[in-house]
Image (cartoon, rainbow, N blue to C red):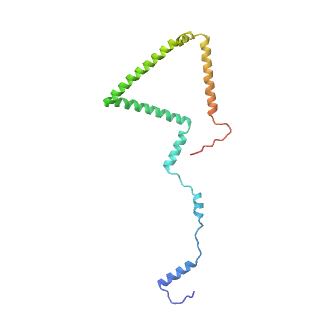
């Protein structure tokens, strides 16, 4: 390239710069560079996701889950205790249907109890129950055996459901 002493115009200077830049080699990062950098970048989780995960972890503990279930049951009972009477008073058609359902349900239950009582008398079950002594050492032995059986089942269930000792439990997230 021959450079003369005469001053260059703007267009000529631009052409010289563009030619010089075009002779330079490619100075771009490799294709895997962005991926390698992004692997090291720790992006914070959005706040709702963090709150959801914390709440889920809190509720996963058995005592907390039991408290949540109890709270839910109490709220459902209170809501029903408020809404059902309100509906029965405000909407006569619902009150009429509810009255009919209650009357029929009570009659069905009464007939079932009478049928069971008749069957127990006819089959001789009532006579067998009369023969069972409700006092004395027999009832105490039966009570103690039932208590021991129940306690044994509760202990066995506890043993089955506990975390194995000396082993790390890995929680898998779906």
Q: Return the x and y of residue 89 as percentages of the image width and height.
A: 32, 29
Question: In terms of image quadrants, where is residue 102?
Answer: top left
Q: Which residue is depicted at the point 54% across and 81% down?
A: 19
Would you place residue 141 above or below residue 62 in this image? above
Q: Which residue is depicted at the point 55% across and 42% down?
A: 57
* The one of 123 and 109 positioned closer to us in this rendering: 123
* The one of 174 and 69 positioned closer to us in this rendering: 174
Would you place residue 160 above or below residue 54 in this image? above
Outermost residue toward the right in this view: 166
Q: Return the x and y of residue 40 as percentages of the image width and height.
A: 59, 58
Outermost residue toward the bottom in this view: 5
Q: Return the x and y of residue 32 as percentages of the image width and height.
A: 60, 63
Q: Which residue is depicted at the point 61% across and 16% down?
A: 142
- Total labels: the figure holds 0
Q: Return the x and y of residue 71 as percentages of the image width and height.
A: 47, 34
Question: In terms of image quadrants, where is residue 137?
Answer: top right
* The one of 36 and 91 positioned closer to us in this rendering: 91
Would you place residue 3 above or below residue 171 in this image? below
Q: In the picture, which quadrant includes the N terminus? A: bottom right
Q: Which residue is depicted at the point 33% across and 27% down?
A: 96
Would you place residue 51 above or below residue 162 in this image? below
């Amino acid at each position: 390239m021959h450079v003369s002493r005469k001053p260059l115009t703007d267009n000529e200077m631009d052409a010289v710069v563009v030619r010089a830049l075009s002779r330079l080699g490619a100075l771009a990062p490799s294709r895997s560079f962005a991926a390698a950098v992004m692997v090291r970048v720790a992006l914070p989780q959005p706040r709702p996701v963090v709150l959801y995960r914390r709440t889920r972890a809190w509720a996963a503990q058995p005592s907390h889950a039991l408290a949540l279930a109890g709270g839910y049951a109490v709220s459902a009972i209170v809501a029903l205790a408020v809404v059902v009477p309100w509906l029965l008073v405000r909407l006569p058609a619902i009150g009429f249907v509810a009255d009919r359902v209650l009357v029929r349900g009570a009659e069905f239950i009464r007939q079932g109890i009478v049928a069971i009582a008749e069957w127990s008398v006819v089959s001789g079950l009532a006579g067998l129950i009369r023969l069972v002594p409700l006092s004395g050492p027999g009832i105490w032995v039966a009570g103690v055996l039932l208590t021991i059986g129940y306690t044994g089942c509760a202990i066995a269930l506890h043993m089955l459901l506990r975390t194995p000792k000396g082993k790390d439990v890995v929680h898998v997230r779906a």
